[in-house]
Image (cartoon, coloured by chain):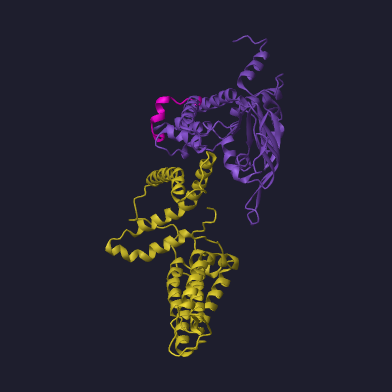
Chain colours: A yellow, B purple
Amino acid sequence: MKDVTLGQFFPGNSIVHRTDARIKLLCVIAYIVGIFLAKSAAAYALVLVATVLLALVSSIPMSTLLKSLKPLTFIIIITSIINIFWYTAPEGAVPLVEFWKIKIYAGGLMTAVYMILRIACLIVGTSVLLTYTTSPIALTDAIESLLVPLKIIKLPVHEFAMMMTIALRFIPTLIEETNKIMAAQKSRGADFSSGGLTKRAKAMIPIIIPLFISAFRRADDLAIAMECRCYRGGSGRTKMNIKKLAPTDILLPLFTAAIIAGAVLLNKFVPFNIV
Amino acid sequence: MTSAELKNVSYIYSRGTPFEKKAVKNVSVAFEKGKITGIIGHTGSGKSTLAQLINGLLEISEGEVFVDGQNIWENKKNIRSVRFNVGLVFQYPEYQLFEETVYKDIAFGPKNMGLDEGDIDKRVKTAAKEVGLDEALLDKSPFELSGGQKRRAAIAGVIAMQPEILILDEPAAGLDPRGRESIMKMLSSYCAESGASVVMISHSMEDIAQYCDDILVMNKGEVFFFGTTSEAFAMSGRLSLIGLAVPQVTRVLIELNKLGFDVSTSIYTVDDAVKEIEKLFGGGEKC
């Protein structure tokens, strides 16, 4: 349970850290579009270089970034296998390797490599741009302020953002609580690691019930504490830190715009593929 | 007779990461049966870690732990049965109650031990009696009980396993003075009746002074002192060096001593202090 790194934030002072969270949020969307636009080898190279550049600038340790890819190993392997072995080759393509019924084409290998690059860039890029360099509070603030237009159609944007903030805030608390309850039940001989599926599911009851009760208790306490400070939802609330755009906030949008433009242009003018 | 013994035990948190921290350093202690041992020390001095090392929730990094003469890590698969012998009551144990009835909750431990129904029934009832829970409460939901009753029910759940050594982390935390006193009295009578070791982690010097036979003082993961209660509180100077205070009555006597009154400063219960001060007025007549 200690390894849960949901939205782990690494404080820092790089340009990526300092950029306004709203800008970063929009840039991430643009960046993802950029990745999916890349079609040729040159465009992929550009995306890769851009991602590495971002990672270097953010000064997040490379080992951490590689670790964030680890949970995806399975997906990466599966997609590679599918791409390599189920590649529908164009007419007249000569397979690289051929034995029994299996034919491996250069095209298939290429698509597999592109796929891996795409997934890796997607994960590394979004975590560098967003989760690793933006505090959860800044992130929910950004979401709230970007969703403000939806207020027109009476969506409770502030409440939604508040819910997210509270949820994020309580993740570590509940993890700690779970560990405590698990230790306590283990001390009474509870066994979580043996037996079949039903037995294991049943073994979770002594954890889940106290956890729910404590979550409700905390929710109650929090509600009272908020009410004591006269919280009554979003209307009329002002912010302590009003985010103002700084001149440096233009750099990241320019960078992502360059990726998109570069990908499109390279696709068109350097449509070189190894196949 | 010792119930649990630690030999040169060390424990390192998050070994091999930048967050590596030695929480317990080279601790060697033995807990006697039929005695109450108090563990005192600052937050982060390794008290709670020590408790979890004795029942095998945490695996020691170095050294050996013996429970009932058996090295608990000799056979890793048997670690669960060690926990039946080392009852551990965590802080605020009432937060782990989960069953529909108090009876079922107390029976959780004995059931995990694989006992038969009759045996479980006997144990649940004895345990409830031991902690002073009325039998009528056994059929209630644990969530209908009062705070103090919940605490008792949770402690009964551990006592029902009839462990050789019962370790409690702050058993009286958050209770009112009356609840506090009755929990402490209950523990001391449990210790005398069952003949098990009782080990109690506490921040209350008064409770420790009044109810414990031995004291283990932890400081920064090391054993600072291990001996009888009177020995421990006789060294108020050394205790205050590591930021621990002696009981209030002892402090009163120390101050009186400084003012030139001839009183002993190794007294740590109110009753003894009253007698000592009465001596000053000539032979203990009541005024």
Residue nearer the viewer, A12 or A101: A101
Q: Residue at x 56, y 67 (%)?
A: A65
Q: Is residue B86 visible?
A: no
Above or below residue A12? Residue B180 is above
Above or below residue A150? Residue B13 is above
Q: Residue B47, percent across and down?
A: 62, 39
Q: Which residues are magenta?
A: B130-143
Q: Residue B185, percent across and down?
A: 55, 24
Q: Residue A214, percent across and down?
A: 43, 43
Q: Quadrant of residue B67?
A: top right
Above or below residue A75? Residue B124 is above
| Horizontal relation, residue B9 to residue A196: left or right | right
Q: Residue A140, percent across and down?
A: 42, 60
| Horizontal relation, residue B22 to residue A250: left or right | right
Where does the N terminus of chain B fall, quadrant-wise?
top right
Residue extending furthest toward the front:
A100
Where does the C terminus of chain B fall, quadrant-wise?
top right
Residue nearer the viewer, B75 or B189: B75
Q: How many marks?
A: 0
Q: Quadrant of residue B198?
A: top right
Q: Residue at x 47, y 33 (%)?
A: B106
Residue nearer the viewer, A209 or B212: A209
Residue extending furthest toward the left:
A153
Residue nearer the viewer, B215 or A271: A271
